[in-house]
Amino acid sequence: QVQLVESGGGLVQAGGSLRLSCAASGRTLSTYYMGWFRQAPGKEREFLAAISWNGGSTYYADSVKGRFTISRDNAKNTVYLQMNSLKPEDTAVYYCQAERSRTRVAGPPRPDYWGQGTQVTVSS
């Protein structure tokens, strides 16, 4: 069993930056393909970014490519999402996910575990 806890959300002005963290407990994340999703009110869940088990490969949705960066520190059992040039339309609850895989290098995770999310609000 893996428990995922997101943090780092908050209120930021348009054009600003936030760094989200996803800390895992229960098992090492080094065997998991990790990803970030978000869900805005009244909208479907949207895939954002994913990273392979060793950080060697990353994969992004077109909507965030060039603005968001996913990374991981397996020694700290943590995955990060650096978000720059934030826009009001980035306002959502952001979730991390874990898929048990050392072979995935692209595409949204097919998650075995989800976090509970962290709210990001971007004001105009």
Image (spheres, rainbow, N blue to C red):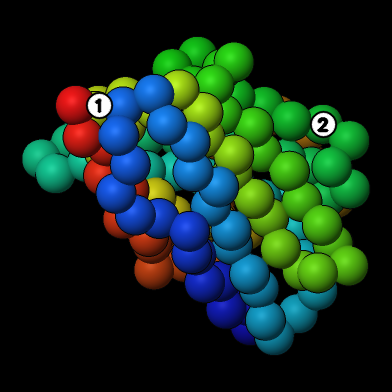
The amino acid marked with disc number 1 is Glu
Q: Residue at x 67, y 81 (%)?
A: 25
Give the Cα distance between marks 2 and 1.
27 Å
Farthest residue to the left: give it: 42
Q: Disc 2 vs disc 1: which is toward the camera?
A: 1
- Which structural element holds mark 2? loop
Pick the residue in front: 61 or 14.
14
Q: Nearer the viewer, residue 14 or 73?
A: 14
- Which labelled disc corresponds to residue 57? 2
> Which quadrant of the view contains residue 15?
top left
Residue 112 can be seen in this image:
no
Q: Residue at x 64, y 32 (%)?
A: 69
- Which comes before the other along the chain, label 2 or label 1? 2
Quarter of the figure that contains the C terminus: top left
Q: Nearer the viewer, residue 65 or 104?
A: 65
Q: In the rendered structure, are the residues bearing label 2 and label 1 in contact, judged by CB atoms less than 8 Å apart? A: no
Question: Secondary structure beneath disc 1?
Answer: helix
Residue that carries the numbered disc 1 in the rendered image: 89
Image location of residue 103, percent across then percent down:
84, 43
In this rendering, the answer to whether 62 lies above or below 3 is above
Callout 2: 10 Å neighbours few (<14), some, many (20+)? some
On screen, residue 103 versus residue 106, left or right, reads: right
Residue 83 position within the rendered picture, expressed as x and y whole percent measured from the top left: 52, 35
- Can you give x and y, in whole percent of width and height, for residue 31 in the image? 83, 61
Looking at the rendered structure, the kind of residue marked 2 is Ser
Q: Based on the displayed image, in which of its 4 quarters is residue 76 positioned?
A: bottom right
Q: Is residue 2 left or right of residue 10?
A: right
**Res. 51 visible in picture:** yes
Give coordinates of residue 24: x percent, y percent: 66, 73
